[in-house]
């Protein structure tokens, strides 16, 4: 009897958590996007796919920028079937390769006359190196998106008002970004045990936030705004490359406490669609709300500028493709 009562109490507490603290708000925008073009990285599953589905329903031309052709083409067909929008397509993009990023940007600029929304959604939680010798999470989660955004900014400006939305995470709070390690080893931090792998992930999410802050500063006076966000605790395939024992330990918590990808897409959609937030460009959002208590490490303007300069160097950007750091008027 006591066991049954305890079980019932736990079930009640769990249900209460699911409908209160864990429940995520919905984006309430009724915006229509006919005639608009959207690029979403990592849109073949999880939050990215749900974001693509929603924007396709609103009439947008949606480009799924993904590495895995087979999975992306399957996602394209599912989205078309669910939404009736035929303007959904796949373009090859491997964020772990700067050459692939450049090729994608070149192909997009040749094939698309406008770009209204760039959603930097893709992310990995795995160790290893990119094709260019960077740490995998720094290279994919930050550097690939940095280069992609810079290469597409001119088209975003001519299509404006337009937006850049970058999916970060509250895990930035556990970051410890060491620029000397980044400069010397192209990764941060060194080591490959689970705590170090997670620290690398946290660092990459801090990079997302700092990048957005500095991008906003450099875009002042233009018709492009940008936002970073925490999607919530969401069940995605982010940790699919983690070791078996970590999965055994984490998966029960994962399924009990984490929400579905549709819930996780809501703050992305809010930042992409909500009117009247243009003056909040560069800020960090969660639960479809501006976050005012963001940690000091995510508000470090010097670190943001330093990261930008280092990222330009790592990407080998010429002066032609450098965003003007002076008056924010565009490319130099």
Image (cartoon, rainbow, N blue to C red):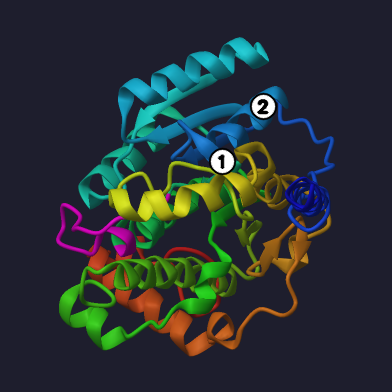
Number of numbered discs on residues: 2
Give SS at disc 2.
Answer: loop
Q: Name the residue under label 1.
A: 47
- Look at the image and give the residue range highlighted in magenta: 123-138
The residue lying toward the viewer, choosing from 156 and 305, is: 305
Which of marks 1 and 2 precedes in the sequence?
A: 2
| Residue at horizontal 25 percent and vertical 88 percent from the top | 180
Q: Where is residue 46 in the image (x, y as percent from the top left)?
A: 52, 37
| Residue at horizontal 54 percent and vertical 56 percent from the top | 166
Q: Image height check: is 320 above or below 251?
A: below
On screen, residue 39 versus residue 127, left or right, reads right
Q: Position of residue 140 (x, y in %)?
A: 33, 55
Q: Which residue lies furthest to the front in this view?
A: 1
Badge 2: how crowded within 10 Å, few (<14), some, or many (20+)?
few
Q: Does the magenta stretch include residue 310?
A: no
Q: Nearer the viewer, mark 2 or mark 1?
A: 1
The residue lying toward the viewer, choosing from 114 and 241, is: 241
For the C terminus, the quadrant is bottom left
Give SS at disc 1.
Answer: helix
Q: Where is residue 174 in the image (x, y as percent from the top left)?
A: 48, 78
**Could you tell me what secondary structure mostly forms the magenta stretch?**
loop
Q: Quadrant of residue 195?
A: bottom left
Q: Mark 2 points at which residue?
A: 35
Residue 86 in view here = no
On screen, residue 7 versus residue 322, left or right, reads right
The residue lying toward the viewer, choosing from 1 and 59, is: 1
């Amino acid at each position: 009897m006591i066991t049954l009562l305890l079980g019932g109490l736990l079930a009640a507490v769990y249900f209460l958590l699911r409908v209160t603290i864990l429940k995520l708000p919905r984006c309430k925008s009724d915006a229509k996007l006919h005639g608009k073009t959207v690029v979403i990285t990592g849109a073949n599953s999880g939050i990215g796919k749900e974001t693509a589905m929603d924007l396709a329903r609103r009439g947008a031309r949606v480009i799924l920028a993904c590495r895995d052709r087979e999975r992306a083409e399957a996602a394209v067909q599912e989205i078309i079937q669910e939404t009736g929008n035929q303007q959904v397509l796949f373009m090859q993009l491997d964020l772990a390769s700067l050459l692939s990023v450049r090729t994608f940007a070149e192909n997009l600029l040749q094939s698309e006359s406008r770009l209204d929304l760039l959603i930097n959604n893709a992310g990995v939680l795995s160790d290893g190196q990119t094709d260019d010798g960077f740490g995998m999470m720094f290279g994919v989660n930050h550097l690939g998106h940095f280069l992609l955004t810079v290469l597409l900014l001119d088209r975003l400006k001519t299509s404006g008002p337009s937006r850049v939305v970058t999916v970060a995470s509250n895990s930035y709070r556990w970051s410890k970004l060491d620029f000397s390690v980044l400069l010397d080893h192209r990764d941060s931090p060194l080591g490959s045990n689970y705590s170090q792998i997670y620290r690398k992930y946290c660092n990459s999410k801090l990079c997302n936030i700092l990048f957005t802050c500095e991008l906003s500063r450099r875009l002042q006076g233009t018709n492009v705004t940008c936002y970073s966000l925490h999607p919530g605790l969401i069940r995605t395939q982010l940790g699919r490359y983690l070791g078996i024992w970590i999965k055994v330990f984490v998966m029960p918590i994962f399924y009990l406490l984490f929400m579905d990808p549709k819930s996780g897409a809501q703050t992305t959609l809010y930042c992409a669609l909500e009117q009247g937030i243009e003056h909040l460009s560069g800020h960090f959002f969660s639960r479809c709300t501006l976050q005012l208590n963001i940690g000091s490490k995510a508000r470090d303007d010097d670190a943001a500028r330093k990261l930008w300069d280092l990222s330009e160097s790592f990407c080998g950007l010429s002066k032609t493709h450098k965003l003007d750091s002076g008056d924010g008027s565009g490319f130099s």
